[in-house]
Image: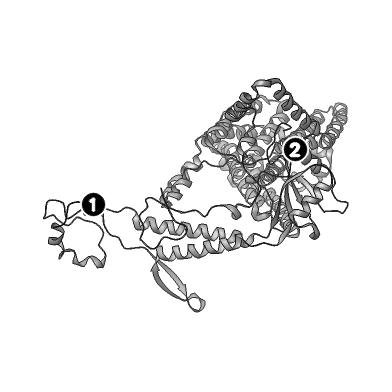
Amino acid sequence: LGTQTTITDRTIRLSGIPPELQSEDKIKDFIQELGIGNVETVLMCRQWAELDRYIVKRNDLLRRLEEAYTVYQGHRSIERNLEALPVVQPVPPGPSVNPEDEEHDDDEHRRLLRSDDAMPAQTPYARVRPKAKIYFGRFKLRSRQVDAIDYYEEKLRVCDDEIRELRSKTFEPVPLAFVTMDSVAACQMACQAVLDPSPLQLLANPSPAPADIVWSNTYLSRRSRMFRSWSITAFILLLTVFWSVTFVPIATFLNTDTIREFFPALAEVLDSHPLVRSLVTNQLPTIAVTLLNAIVPYLYDWLSNCQGMTSQGDVELSVISKNFFFTFFNFFIVFTILGTASNFYDQYKDIGKNLRDTTRFAWTLASSLQNLLPFYTNFIILQGLGLFPFRLLEIGTVALYPIGLMGAKTPRDYAELIQPPRFSYGLYLPQTILIFIICVVYSVLRDSWKVILSGLVYFVIGSFVYKYQLLYAMDHRQHSTGKSWSMICDRVQIGIILFQITVGGQLALKKALLRSVMLVPLVVGSVWFFLVFGRTYKPLMKFIALKSVRRAEHADYASAEQHGVDSDNHHRYQQESNHGQTVDESRESGMRFINPSLISPLDKVWIADGMHKPGTQSTSGVESA
């Protein structure tokens, strides 16, 4: 990161700006008076809600206008010109002609006298222009049909005028700004320093990439953002209780003894049919858990987008955190404790005591893991051999393509239909970490080779599938600068601590109490390392060390001195080959921090050809495909 010079690496996100500093010039003077570097640009976020609403409204009107043009021009039959031979020809089938063409028969002889090149040899049949129903009057109870193209063109023209007027307007500022410094070192010094002695004022943090910012959340108030965050957190806690209760009936079917305790008649049927018993106790719980693990992440993804975060990278990190909490706590911890075969009901009644008492928790976890070994083996095999081929085929995108194709009408719809799907780490990474933790925990248990071999197959196939998706099939636009690695390390360390607790529980089950107690210092040391890692290594993952930045600057200077006379050729080579540039540097070249609603061009109507009714073209123009 120290060698990067992108605009993102030189920009800070300054929040908590007091009212007396809420202007670009005052913020620039304040930062430069601190003596940490020069300020290139300052973007003061403002109340752009009205402008954003008009942009959304314009996009809707543009799509409606394009659809009206497409309906008017699409699937038209071609008729032969009546000037062409033979003189007498049958009326070709096709849509009816407009009423103003009633003089068609009377003009037949006059057309024969015209020159052959007066009209094209083929002309499309005339079609009735599409209509739009508008509602008016008290409570919008009255309606009438109007010409759709004229109506939407006029609405689009009025909307364009409103947008131009709003763009020239000065909006009320909000306490958030993006400040771009002249160097990465100045930006890092500002981010790692306390700029103001007052709490919650002038808080500097590394900025997200310009294309990564959710501009509709930049003008949310701090109170609104905190209310959203705490409300969704409370809702997730309720969901945690709900998922824990949901796993109870699934865990019931893991063993016939538990089924006999709750459903005696069903247990008798299963005892008399071994194949059905194997299906119910082995495959049915695995399929049910797999479906939950596939559906719940999308719910958490939607909840994370509702929290009001200012960047898609932060949203993705939040999705990773929420989904891992679901897969690890609800699926692995709770399900494992509930899945004890013989005394399931007793464990369910004493689940609170099991979670509070470490010794009892270790004993329960160890005994339950040994009994759940076939279940986790089937689960990993299903994830690796069953679901990875569907992910490789992008079965979801392929299945939705015919539905989208049936609803697509305009060229814009068809262009959006072939866009690559978005790769989200929040949907795939938590489950991969969980399977790694399961393999680590089972690595010392009896018959663990089944889980280890299944995990090896899962990661071998997964490496090819995810590599193919990221390189060739899917798109990932988020700029997280490796922040997810700190989350991965934290969760792997949690898995190691859980592994040590499981080993202690296994030794306790084997009556090796002294050896089990000897593992306590190891668990304490792992917890200590977990805390030290968070205090020492995490800041290095969040910020760029100034020494690394200076080393990169000196390396660039030494490279220029080394090339000497050939510096011009070397500079041209750097420009033409992008040598030494990272993906983020090449992607962010020429970008700047500004709300797209302020500068984005007002798109033209995108239709299949340039034919339209004369005199109805709006100020936005018509663009031909």
User: Which of 479/332 is in front?
Assistant: 479
Q: Amino acid at mark 1?
A: Pro
Image-based side of 435 in relation to 386, left or right: right
The secondary element bearing badge 2 is classed as: helix
Q: Which residue is mark 2?
A: 184
- The residue furthest bottom is 138
x and y percentages locating residue 10 in the rendered image: 72, 41
Q: Is residue 169 above or below residue 74?
A: below
| Rendered image quadrant of residue 570 | top right
> Horizontally, is 265 left or right of 14 in the view?
left
**Vertical relation: 560 (above or below) 19:** above
Q: Count residues near mark 2 (Cα–Cα under 10 Å), then give few for <14, some for 14-19, many for 20+.
A: many
Query: Please, what is the three-letter code of the amino acid marked with disc 2?
Result: Val
Mark 2 and mark 1: Cα distance apart in space: 64 Å
Residue at 74%, 23% in the rendered image: 558
Secondary structure beneath label 1: loop
Left or right position of 550 against 131:
right
Q: Out of 200 and 600, give the one closest to the viewer.
A: 600
Q: Earlier in the sequence, mark 2 or mark 1?
A: 1
Residues at marks 2 and 1 touching, judged by CB atoms closer than 8 Å: no
Q: Residues within 10 Å of mark 1 (few under 14, many from 20)?
A: few
- Residue at numbered disc 1: 120
Instruction: Name the disc covering residue 590, or none.
Output: none
Point out the image quarter for the N terminus.
top right
Task: Say which of 452 and 395 sits in front.
Answer: 395
Task: Work out whether residue 165 or residue 270 is closer to the camera in this orientation and state it.
Answer: 165
